[in-house]
Image (cartoon, helix red, strand yellow):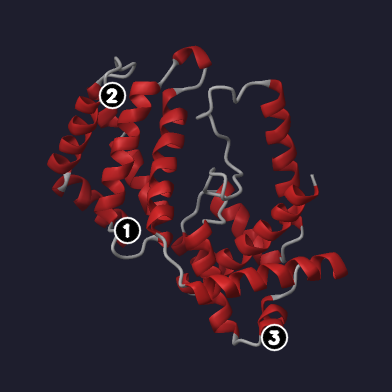
Amino acid sequence: MPSEAVIYQDSFCIDSQTHLKAAAKNAYNEQRKEFAIDDQQITQFIPMVHKIVQKVAIYLKPPLSYEDLVSVGTIGLVKAARDYDPSHKAEFKTYAYIRIRGAILDELRDSSFVPAGVNKQIQEAEKLTAESIDQTGHTPTDEELAQKLDIPVTKLYRMFENARAKKFISLDSSSEHAVSLKSTLESSDATAPFRQLEKKELIDKLAQAITGLNEKQRHLIVLYYQQDLTMKQIAEVFGVTEPRVSQIHASALFNLSVKIKQWKDDK
């Protein structure tokens, strides 16, 4: 039996076909360059937009809606078709996936807002986590960090989720504000030797940082980023609720971001 998310996605695809085509047409008309991919091929990739939006829906907060992100992703798809260069020897599907995801994540990041008091608490948590790593060689447990901050663990998880939304400290993202485990083809000089070396070094450091997570966090990272499972599916694997999976995810990414920041600061 298809999940509610799949049913919703299929329904949305049918109900919003006119809206999506209009968004794609508007983006197309704004461009001045000749498309390497024709509009019929573009339409074939619209289901990919829905798949990506469903994957990052965990970050979705008002006033943004599912439909808003689909529109943004569709425009990203059209721009990918405009900019695609077959000479780079990358499949359009791969290139489009990266551009669509990037457009959606940028929209989510730009819409994020965290009060000054919460932001200050996030910075304090980052400082305490970094100090714990320096002193003990590992990140503090959620309970230990909550105790250091003198707040309940439930409040700590809300802080993690706010940090994830504001700074998008996520392996999904490829901006200067976050760490990316995914390969990126957006930069025209990404194939330059120094870029390849930098990317390899970053991935090596990420792998090292991931090994420092607790077992459940490591398992989640593999299931979510390598096996491409949804939060709902991971909840079924873990035998916990979906909100609990979101908490583990946010905690893992917070710890990874602190470790990677330390590495960058030491360079």
Classify residue 227 as left or right of residue 142: left
Dot 1 crowding, Cα within 10 Å, few <14, some 14–19, many 20+: few
Helix, strand or loop for disc 1:
helix
Classify residue 221 as left or right of residue 158: right
Percent across and percent down for residue 260 are 71, 52
Between circles 2 and 3, the one closer to the viewer is 3
Q: Eyeballing the image, is 191 above or below 165?
A: above
Q: How far apart are the two marked residues, 2 and 3, measured between alpha carbons?
A: 54 Å
Q: Quadrant of residue 254?
A: bottom right
- Whichever of callouts 2 and 3 sits on the residue coming sooner in the sequence is 2
The residue that mark 2 highlights is: 41
Type of the residue with mark 1: Ala
Q: How far apart are the two marked residues, 2 and 1, measured between alpha carbons?
A: 25 Å
Q: Eyeballing the image, is 102 above or below 84?
A: below
Percent across and percent down for residue 201 are 75, 38
Residue 239 visible in the picture: no
The residue that mark 3 highlights is: 147
